[in-house]
Image (cartoon, rainbow, N blue to C red):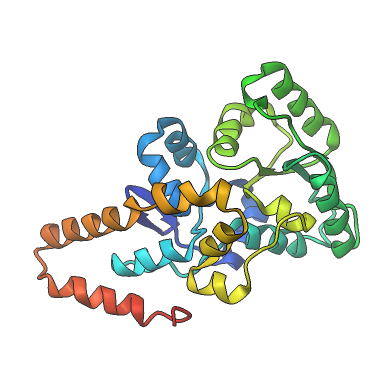
Amino acid sequence: MKAVTILDIPIHNLSRAELLEKLNDKGGVVVTPNVHHLVMLRNDPELREAYQKADYRICDSKIVQYASIFLGHPIQEKISGSDLFPAFYEYNKNNQKIKIFLLGAQPGIAKQAQEKINQKVGREIVVETYSPPLGFEQDERECQKIIELIRSSGANVLALGLGTPKQEKWIVKYKKCLKTIDIVLAIGATIDFEAGHKPRSPKWMSDVGLEWFYRLICEPKRLWRRYLIECLPFIGLVVKQKLKQQITTKKSPTNLLKNIKKVLNFPNLI
Protein backbone atom coordinates (compact mmCIF):
# COMPACT_ATOMS: atom_id res chain seq x y z
CA MET A 1 0.00 0.00 0.00
CA LYS A 2 1.14 3.52 -0.74
CA ALA A 3 1.86 5.63 2.31
CA VAL A 4 2.68 9.27 3.07
CA THR A 5 5.10 9.84 5.94
CA ILE A 6 4.25 12.69 8.30
CA LEU A 7 6.40 13.19 11.43
CA ASP A 8 7.95 9.74 10.84
CA ILE A 9 4.55 7.99 10.73
CA PRO A 10 3.55 6.34 7.43
CA ILE A 11 -0.13 7.10 6.77
CA HIS A 12 -1.79 4.88 4.18
CA ASN A 13 -3.01 6.75 1.14
CA LEU A 14 -6.33 4.98 0.61
CA SER A 15 -9.80 6.05 -0.37
CA ARG A 16 -12.67 5.02 1.89
CA ALA A 17 -13.96 2.63 -0.78
CA GLU A 18 -10.55 0.97 -1.06
CA LEU A 19 -10.28 0.60 2.71
CA LEU A 20 -13.74 -0.97 3.07
CA GLU A 21 -12.94 -3.47 0.32
CA LYS A 22 -9.61 -4.40 1.91
CA LEU A 23 -11.16 -4.82 5.36
CA ASN A 24 -13.78 -7.23 4.08
CA ASP A 25 -11.20 -9.11 2.04
CA LYS A 26 -8.30 -9.35 4.51
CA GLY A 27 -9.45 -7.91 7.83
CA GLY A 28 -6.98 -5.99 9.99
CA VAL A 29 -6.54 -3.32 12.64
CA VAL A 30 -7.37 0.29 11.76
CA VAL A 31 -6.01 3.33 13.62
CA THR A 32 -6.91 6.90 12.74
CA PRO A 33 -4.05 9.40 13.17
CA ASN A 34 -4.94 13.03 13.67
CA VAL A 35 -2.85 16.03 14.78
CA HIS A 36 -3.03 15.15 18.47
CA HIS A 37 -2.06 11.52 17.87
CA LEU A 38 0.94 12.45 15.71
CA VAL A 39 2.24 14.77 18.42
CA MET A 40 1.65 12.18 21.18
CA LEU A 41 3.45 9.48 19.20
CA ARG A 42 6.72 11.35 19.49
CA ASN A 43 6.86 10.82 23.26
CA ASP A 44 4.90 7.61 23.77
CA PRO A 45 6.79 4.43 22.75
CA GLU A 46 3.82 2.15 23.53
CA LEU A 47 1.48 4.15 21.31
CA ARG A 48 4.13 4.22 18.58
CA GLU A 49 4.38 0.43 18.78
CA ALA A 50 0.59 0.17 18.45
CA TYR A 51 0.69 2.34 15.34
CA GLN A 52 3.53 0.31 13.83
CA LYS A 53 1.60 -2.93 14.36
CA ALA A 54 -1.67 -1.58 12.90
CA ASP A 55 -2.56 -2.82 9.41
CA TYR A 56 -4.11 0.49 8.35
CA ARG A 57 -3.19 4.00 9.46
CA ILE A 58 -5.70 6.34 7.85
CA CYS A 59 -5.89 10.12 7.86
CA ASP A 60 -8.44 11.26 10.44
CA SER A 61 -7.83 15.00 10.07
CA LYS A 62 -8.21 17.63 7.38
CA ILE A 63 -5.25 19.42 8.98
CA VAL A 64 -3.11 16.31 8.50
CA GLN A 65 -4.31 16.13 4.89
CA TYR A 66 -3.30 19.78 4.37
CA ALA A 67 0.11 18.95 5.88
CA SER A 68 0.54 16.15 3.34
CA ILE A 69 -0.14 18.60 0.50
CA PHE A 70 2.34 21.08 1.98
CA LEU A 71 4.93 18.28 2.15
CA GLY A 72 4.38 17.50 -1.52
CA HIS A 73 2.71 14.09 -1.13
CA PRO A 74 -1.07 14.63 -0.94
CA ILE A 75 -3.23 12.15 0.96
CA GLN A 76 -6.21 11.57 -1.33
CA GLU A 77 -8.95 11.46 1.30
CA LYS A 78 -9.63 12.21 4.96
CA ILE A 79 -11.27 9.16 6.55
CA SER A 80 -12.19 9.99 10.12
CA GLY A 81 -13.28 7.19 12.43
CA SER A 82 -16.68 8.82 12.81
CA ASP A 83 -17.14 8.65 9.02
CA LEU A 84 -15.56 5.24 8.54
CA PHE A 85 -17.69 3.41 11.09
CA PRO A 86 -21.12 4.29 9.64
CA ALA A 87 -19.73 3.67 6.16
CA PHE A 88 -18.54 0.25 7.36
CA TYR A 89 -21.85 -0.89 8.80
CA GLU A 90 -23.82 0.45 5.81
CA TYR A 91 -21.38 -1.32 3.46
CA ASN A 92 -22.02 -4.57 5.35
CA LYS A 93 -25.70 -4.24 6.16
CA ASN A 94 -26.55 -7.25 4.00
CA ASN A 95 -23.41 -9.18 4.89
CA GLN A 96 -24.60 -11.62 7.54
CA LYS A 97 -21.00 -12.60 8.30
CA ILE A 98 -20.27 -9.18 9.83
CA LYS A 99 -21.13 -8.96 13.54
CA ILE A 100 -19.91 -6.01 15.63
CA PHE A 101 -19.01 -5.61 19.30
CA LEU A 102 -18.93 -2.04 20.63
CA LEU A 103 -16.45 -1.44 23.46
CA GLY A 104 -16.42 1.97 25.11
CA ALA A 105 -18.45 5.08 26.01
CA GLN A 106 -20.27 5.65 29.29
CA PRO A 107 -22.73 3.07 30.70
CA GLY A 108 -25.86 2.95 28.58
CA ILE A 109 -24.44 5.00 25.71
CA ALA A 110 -23.08 2.03 23.76
CA LYS A 111 -26.48 0.30 24.12
CA GLN A 112 -28.18 3.36 22.65
CA ALA A 113 -25.71 3.30 19.76
CA GLN A 114 -26.41 -0.40 19.24
CA GLU A 115 -30.16 0.17 19.02
CA LYS A 116 -29.83 3.08 16.59
CA ILE A 117 -27.32 1.33 14.33
CA ASN A 118 -29.35 -1.88 14.17
CA GLN A 119 -32.47 0.13 13.36
CA LYS A 120 -30.66 1.92 10.52
CA VAL A 121 -29.23 -1.28 9.09
CA GLY A 122 -32.36 -3.38 9.54
CA ARG A 123 -30.67 -6.28 11.29
CA GLU A 124 -28.71 -7.10 14.45
CA ILE A 125 -25.31 -6.13 13.04
CA VAL A 126 -24.16 -4.90 16.48
CA VAL A 127 -24.49 -8.03 18.58
CA GLU A 128 -23.19 -6.81 21.94
CA THR A 129 -21.73 -3.83 23.79
CA TYR A 130 -19.77 -3.12 26.95
CA SER A 131 -18.85 0.11 28.72
CA PRO A 132 -15.81 -0.61 30.92
CA PRO A 133 -15.23 1.21 34.22
CA LEU A 134 -12.65 3.97 34.57
CA GLY A 135 -9.14 2.54 34.89
CA PHE A 136 -10.16 -0.88 33.56
CA GLU A 137 -6.98 -1.18 31.49
CA GLN A 138 -4.96 -1.51 34.71
CA ASP A 139 -7.18 -4.30 36.06
CA GLU A 140 -6.24 -7.66 34.53
CA ARG A 141 -9.37 -9.34 35.88
CA GLU A 142 -11.56 -6.73 34.19
CA CYS A 143 -9.63 -7.08 30.93
CA GLN A 144 -10.11 -10.84 30.96
CA LYS A 145 -13.82 -10.30 31.58
CA ILE A 146 -13.96 -8.05 28.49
CA ILE A 147 -12.15 -10.66 26.40
CA GLU A 148 -14.65 -13.32 27.45
CA LEU A 149 -17.60 -11.02 26.65
CA ILE A 150 -16.21 -10.41 23.17
CA ARG A 151 -15.54 -14.12 22.58
CA SER A 152 -19.00 -15.20 23.71
CA SER A 153 -20.78 -12.52 21.67
CA GLY A 154 -20.05 -14.16 18.32
CA ALA A 155 -18.68 -10.87 16.96
CA ASN A 156 -15.92 -10.82 14.37
CA VAL A 157 -15.55 -7.01 14.38
CA LEU A 158 -14.44 -5.01 17.41
CA ALA A 159 -15.08 -1.25 17.44
CA LEU A 160 -13.23 0.49 20.29
CA GLY A 161 -14.37 3.87 21.53
CA LEU A 162 -11.99 4.18 24.47
CA GLY A 163 -10.00 7.20 23.35
CA THR A 164 -6.36 7.46 22.32
CA PRO A 165 -3.91 6.14 23.47
CA LYS A 166 -5.94 3.72 25.62
CA GLN A 167 -7.74 1.94 22.77
CA GLU A 168 -4.61 1.41 20.66
CA LYS A 169 -2.54 0.13 23.58
CA TRP A 170 -5.30 -2.20 24.74
CA ILE A 171 -5.71 -3.88 21.38
CA VAL A 172 -1.95 -4.39 20.98
CA LYS A 173 -1.86 -6.12 24.35
CA TYR A 174 -4.94 -8.29 23.91
CA LYS A 175 -5.47 -8.82 20.17
CA LYS A 176 -3.77 -12.23 20.37
CA CYS A 177 -6.48 -13.33 22.83
CA LEU A 178 -9.27 -12.43 20.39
CA LYS A 179 -8.93 -15.16 17.77
CA THR A 180 -12.48 -14.67 16.49
CA ILE A 181 -11.99 -10.95 15.76
CA ASP A 182 -10.98 -10.28 12.15
CA ILE A 183 -11.43 -6.50 12.05
CA VAL A 184 -10.57 -3.93 14.72
CA LEU A 185 -11.65 -0.30 14.37
CA ALA A 186 -10.20 2.28 16.78
CA ILE A 187 -12.90 4.95 16.51
CA GLY A 188 -12.63 7.23 19.56
CA ALA A 189 -15.76 9.28 20.26
CA THR A 190 -17.75 7.66 17.43
CA ILE A 191 -19.90 5.55 19.77
CA ASP A 192 -21.05 8.77 21.48
CA PHE A 193 -21.88 10.28 18.07
CA GLU A 194 -23.80 7.17 16.97
CA ALA A 195 -25.84 7.21 20.20
CA GLY A 196 -26.62 10.90 19.80
CA HIS A 197 -24.93 11.54 23.15
CA LYS A 198 -22.53 14.09 21.62
CA PRO A 199 -23.09 16.20 18.50
CA ARG A 200 -20.83 16.01 15.47
CA SER A 201 -19.67 19.20 13.83
CA PRO A 202 -21.56 20.49 10.77
CA LYS A 203 -20.24 18.90 7.59
CA TRP A 204 -18.85 22.18 6.26
CA MET A 205 -16.69 22.58 9.38
CA SER A 206 -15.37 19.05 9.01
CA ASP A 207 -14.69 19.63 5.31
CA VAL A 208 -12.52 22.71 5.91
CA GLY A 209 -10.66 21.35 8.94
CA LEU A 210 -12.58 23.05 11.75
CA GLU A 211 -14.10 19.98 13.43
CA TRP A 212 -11.58 20.39 16.26
CA PHE A 213 -12.87 23.93 16.86
CA TYR A 214 -16.47 22.71 17.06
CA ARG A 215 -15.50 20.03 19.58
CA LEU A 216 -13.56 22.59 21.60
CA ILE A 217 -16.65 24.82 21.81
CA CYS A 218 -18.80 21.85 22.88
CA GLU A 219 -16.35 20.52 25.50
CA PRO A 220 -13.98 23.36 26.45
CA LYS A 221 -13.06 22.05 29.92
CA ARG A 222 -12.06 18.64 28.59
CA LEU A 223 -10.45 19.63 25.30
CA TRP A 224 -8.89 23.08 25.71
CA ARG A 225 -5.50 21.73 26.69
CA ARG A 226 -5.44 19.19 23.84
CA TYR A 227 -6.24 21.67 21.09
CA LEU A 228 -4.72 24.90 22.41
CA ILE A 229 -1.50 23.55 23.93
CA GLU A 230 -0.69 19.93 23.09
CA CYS A 231 -1.38 20.19 19.34
CA LEU A 232 0.52 23.45 18.78
CA PRO A 233 3.93 21.84 18.04
CA PHE A 234 2.45 20.10 14.98
CA ILE A 235 2.80 23.09 12.64
CA GLY A 236 6.43 23.71 13.55
CA LEU A 237 7.29 20.01 13.25
CA VAL A 238 5.74 19.80 9.77
CA VAL A 239 7.63 22.92 8.63
CA LYS A 240 10.82 21.38 10.02
CA GLN A 241 10.15 18.19 8.04
CA LYS A 242 9.62 20.26 4.89
CA LEU A 243 12.87 22.16 5.40
CA LYS A 244 14.73 18.87 5.81
CA GLN A 245 13.21 17.72 2.51
CA GLN A 246 14.39 20.92 0.85
CA ILE A 247 17.94 20.42 2.14
CA THR A 248 18.00 16.73 1.15
CA THR A 249 16.75 17.41 -2.38
CA LYS A 250 18.67 20.70 -2.66
CA LYS A 251 15.54 22.54 -3.75
CA SER A 252 15.20 26.28 -3.38
CA PRO A 253 13.02 27.88 -0.66
CA THR A 254 10.59 29.00 -3.37
CA ASN A 255 9.28 25.42 -3.46
CA LEU A 256 8.17 25.91 0.15
CA LEU A 257 6.03 28.86 -0.93
CA LYS A 258 4.62 26.89 -3.85
CA ASN A 259 3.44 24.15 -1.49
CA ILE A 260 1.81 26.72 0.78
CA LYS A 261 -0.10 27.99 -2.27
CA LYS A 262 -1.17 24.41 -3.09
CA VAL A 263 -2.67 24.07 0.39
CA LEU A 264 -4.49 27.38 0.07
CA ASN A 265 -5.93 26.34 -3.29
CA PHE A 266 -7.00 22.91 -2.06
CA PRO A 267 -10.76 22.20 -2.54
CA ASN A 268 -12.96 22.89 0.50
CA LEU A 269 -10.37 25.04 2.23
CA ILE A 270 -12.16 28.23 1.28
| Residue 260 pos. (x, y %) | 27, 74
| Residue 239 pos. (x, y %) | 24, 59
- Asked whether, in this view, residue 103 is left or right of residue 261, the answer is right
- Asked whether, in this view, residue 170 is left or right of residue 78, the answer is right
Q: Which image quarter: residue 234?
A: bottom left
Residue at 74%, 27% (x, y): give it. Answer: 147
- Asked whether, in this view, residue 249 is left or right of residue 177, the answer is left
Q: Which image quarter: residue 248?
A: bottom left
Inspect this view and state whether residue 31 appears.
no
Residue 155 against residue 252 in the figure, above or below:
above
Residue 207 against residue 87 in the figure, above or below:
below
Residue 236 against residue 87 in the figure, above or below:
above
- Asked whether, in this view, residue 239 is left or right of residue 39, the answer is left
| Residue 37 pos. (x, y %) | 46, 47
Residue 76 against residue 48 in the figure, above or below:
below
Residue at 59%, 65% (x, y): give it. Answer: 16
